[in-house]
Image: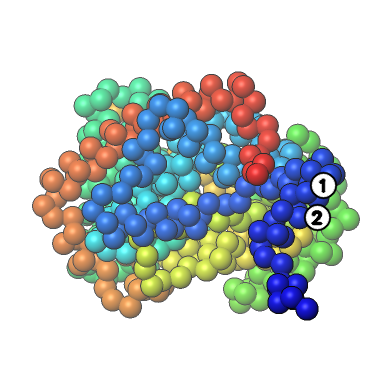
Amino acid sequence: MAEGNNKPKSSNSKASSQKRSRKATGVAPVQQLQSRVEAYRELAEAYVKYPCVMRPGDLTGLARRLHVRSTIIEDHAVRIDEKAEGASEKFEELADSLFSFFRGTSLLFHRDMLGEDERMPTVLALGDVHPENFGIMPNADNVPIFGVNDFDDVLYGPFTWDLKRGITGFLIAAKEEGDQKKKHREKIVRKFVEGYRDGMEFYARHDKEASQQMRPDNSPKVIRRMFKKARNSRKEWLWDRYLNETGRGFRANDELTPISSRISEFQGYINDVAKQNGIDPGGRAGQLKVKDVCIRHGQGTASLGLPRYYCLIEGPSKNASDDLIIEFKRARQSALEGLVPENDFVAGEKGDRIAHGQRVHLAHGDVFYGSVEIDDMSFMSRERAPFRDDIDLDDLSKDSWRDYAHACGQALAQAHARSDDAGELDYRIEPRIIEAMQPFDLFVDDLLCFGREAVKRLKRDHKFFKMDLKRGAFDMTQKHYR
């Protein structure tokens, strides 16, 4: 027998066979385009390793427009494919203003920064710093405090990434929301960075980041006004916004859809969070009994179109005056994943990562921050509260813009300073950051240059986005047809 007759079929023969089969059936293979996180991780590593590597921010013209389009589709692939309620609403909101576009496209923004600032000190970065991601929220004792309040994108990375995102946000918001002139916008940004430096120097001297909190009695005037505005009795808050006529469950309206059939299921999730965080029955959460569950519609900017549930927990009085509302929001991958320079610190995955961020960034924060699996998806949990509130940027005067920016810088400094207390860092981070900011005037000028360039790029990207939205670019995900 000839030797060649015993040879296995080559891969070329196999490919030819598959090709003939496709030709016979008339069906061409189609694949969903996959996440490009790992591809960008390799690009970030190359940027650190080699002195000259082109990054997405260097693209112009049609190449940039295609990058903007594909990145936004990738970031919203699940919502687009599932025809999620709120997905089209989010795209319309992104088109409405440059500030909304900036807030809702964190992945696009950070891909332009990939690999940047590799030499800078590492902290647990917030990831999505802007003027409206600071606010009033409950601490572990249900006392209102001011601080960073959005942990969806937390990841260990250079401290400068948060400052760069923050100053860009202040430049855009001060113009669109505050109608501030260019000279004053840049003074506001400088106050933000000065607040960060002042806070970092304070914690370097006094080592109080583990316990310090910004409360109504020790905060600057602009923040005290926020506390005053946020005051609301729990009973009025519950009855005005959430409870039905019986007080036993959620009302049904455009924002809330009761799903009372899932009470026992969500009771299990509440029990899981209580076990994670050591919450015992008998406190202000009563017996941790779930009274009702609803779907919450149309909330947030970056999270529009992602599933969100509210749980009504019966309070100790059992008269619908002191009930608690616990929110479960679908967790997504951090926009910084694969982009920050490589480091040895791990924040966790999705819901666990977000809960880790809250525990690190806030001293004695919300005890209901946790992580559960719902319908095989990762969700984070937190308490809604009558005094949970964000700044109304329209109400800020020229002077209060600067004061508010300074207070936000201080709050961010505390969040970063806690990376070596509650986080994974095993060395004091404050002295390293203070040294890395020297000479300070040069450091601020570099940040301002970054911010100016980022705003110009965002304006072009926003124009591309609006053109593509009108032409149906975001009605379906992109597929690979070869």
Residue identifier under label 1: 258
Mark 2 belongs to which amino acid?
A: Asp
- Taking the view exactly as shown, the residue that stands out farthest to the front is 1
Is the residue under label 2 in contact with that under label 1 (CB below 8 Å)?
A: yes
From the viewer's perspective, tell me whether residue 64 is left or right of residue 476: left
Residue 249 position, x and y percent, is 81, 50
> Is residue 109 visible from the viewing direction of this image?
yes
Q: Residue at x 41, y 47 (%)?
A: 110
Residue sitting nearer the eye, 297 or 114: 114
* SS category of the residue bearing label 1: strand
In what quadrant of the picture does the C terminus appear?
A: top right
**How far across and down, in percent of the image, does residue 284 sit?**
65, 65
Please report the residue visible at 30 percent of the width from the left and 69 percent of the height from the top: 208
Image quadrant assignment for residue 179: top left
Residue depicted at x 53% and y 61%: 354
Answer few, some or many: residues within 10 Å of disc 2's Cα (few below 14, many 20 plus, some between 14 and 19).
many
Mark 2 sits on what residue?
292
Q: Quadrant of the N terminus?
A: bottom right
